[in-house]
Image: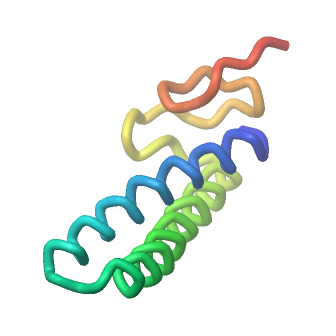
Amino acid sequence: MNTRFWLRRFLINFLIAAGLLLLVNLAKGKALGEAAVESLTWGGIAAAIFIITGIFRARRGDPCRLCGIPPEGPTQTHPGAPNERP
């Protein structure tokens, strides 16, 4: 799993987390500016924790917690990995 894979995964997780948190904060009645700052902050923190633990487990050789596939290297065929050709 290369840097591009992890950056893409971080971006996807960040956007989903920040978007959901923004909707929740707006539903609570917070102002848009305050809700956006809080959502972006916590979305970034959540995505960073997710990616850091994923990188740590991949380097240790632990299998994926979702699908059970062990990491095989940068050209791994994994349900969430981008399709790369050698």
Name the residue: 50% across, 80% down: 41
Name the residue: 56% across, 55% down: 54
Which of the pair 81/16 is nearer the observer? 16
Q: Position of residue 8 (x, y in %)?
A: 63, 44
Which of the pair 62/24 is nearer the observer? 24
- Would you say 29 lies left or right of 20 here? left
| Residue 29, above or below 14 | below
Which of the pair 66/83 is nearer the observer? 83
- Would you say 55 lies left or right of 42 here? right
Q: Position of residue 26 (x, y in %)?
A: 22, 74
Which of the pair 4/17 is nearer the observer? 17
| Residue 24, above or below 13 | below
Pick the quarter of the image with the N terminus: top right
Name the residue: 51% across, 47% down: 12
* Residue lying farthest to the right in this orientation: 86
In this picture the colour scheme is rainbow
Name the residue: 14% across, 81% down: 28
- Would you say 75 lies left or right of 62 here? right
Q: Position of residue 74 (x, y in %)?
A: 77, 32
